[in-house]
Image (cartoon, helix red, strand yellow):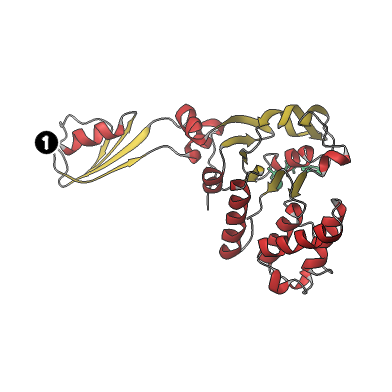
Amino acid sequence: MIDVTSLAKSYGDLRAVDDVSFCVNRGEAFGLLGPNGAGKSTTIHLLAGVIAPDRGKVRLDGADPQEAIVRTRLGVSPQELAIYEELTGEENLRIFAALYGLRGDALVERVHWALDFAGLTDRRKDRAAKYSGGMKRRLNLACAVVHDPELLICDEPTVGVDPQSRNHIFESIEALRASGTTLIYTTHYMSEAQRLCDRVAIMDHGKLLAADTVDALIEAHGGSSLVLAEFDEPPPADAQLPGTLDGTQLRVDSDKPFELAAELGRGPHRVRSLRVERPDLEKVFLQLTGRSLRDS
Ligand SMILES: Nc1ncnc2c1ncn2[C@@H]1O[C@H](COP(=O)(O)OP(=O)(O)O)[C@@H](O)[C@H]1O
Ligand SMILES: [Mg+2]
């Protein structure tokens, strides 16, 4: 559905997006994961046709999203709020619906749907300026989907909101996804990418370092698992144990962690506790960039 080829955008000497290529299939949820400054928002602006690339191209079913007619097929929920604070929630949605070409009963119906989607039906007559941060975020998202787009692009939709709104936003995006909307989702929260996305692209310094399913990324770049064992008594110094022993604690990197754990459990040293840590996206990011991407 979306084809991105050798996309590049610089600001002066800074390569915000540097030779990025990927494709997204219809019905798929595709995540762009990376730290602040990685180039996620710039990529989103290029995808949405808001800015033009220096090089490369974006195609939505073969068409250029810089053409206005193509843009009506997608909805964009930008990282910076794009709502009119002086208008009510309902008025905001009516404006976005009209911009996307809805009229009459269809417009009224979709605005009602979007208010319900955002959980703002009770507050629809209040000016957006009076909304909490979370409510503004929910309205921002609702404005992006009021015209029922085939493709929804969300740029860090859950950043800086209270946990309740964060859950609401996340669950409403999951519901859209379940109903067949294609999704492009940027985040620096690994847990969100892992839960929502069929495939995840890892971005840093404008470059796309890898793109695959979470399982495949972990398989390819996650490295080995870690086995942590705690013994009842410190094993003797000449004990034949793999890994590094510190007092009663043993740490072993292993590609067969469960076999190793079973072996340790069989003795000869009595094991008090055993833990296996499988590699996760954090580890993938660390392996690919040499830096850690903190979740929260
Ligand atoms: N309009 C702009 N002018 C100058 N630099 C920009 C502009 N937009 C983004 N940048 C720079 O490009 C890099 C990528 O930014 P951005 O795409 O916003 O990253 P992310 O969304 O992953 O945090 C950053 O270093 C940012 O400062
Ligand atoms: Mg951003």
Q: Furthest residue to the front?
A: 105
* Rendered location of residue 131, percent (x, y): 72, 70
> In which of the image's four quarters is ligand 1 placed?
top right
Quadrant of the frame with the N terminus: top right
Q: Residues within 10 Å of mark 1 (few under 14, many from 20)?
A: few
Q: Depth check: 1 or 127 in front?
A: 1
Left or right of 225 in this view: 261: left
- Percent x, y for residue 192? 55, 48
Who is closer to the viewer here, 7 or 124?
A: 124
Residue found 38% across the figure and 31% down from its top: 224
Helix, strand or loop at mark 1:
loop
Residue 252 shows in the view: yes
- Side of 142 relative to 190 (left or right): right
Mark 1 — residue?
Answer: 268
- 211 left or right of 105? left
The spot of residue 99 in percent (x, y) is 87, 53
Pick the front one: 135 or 80? 135
Query: Which quarter of the picture shows residue 116?
Result: bottom right
At 80% across and 70% down in the image, what residue appears?
88
Residue 196, given in percent of the width and then of the height, sits at 56, 45
Does any portion of residue 188 appear in the rendered image?
no
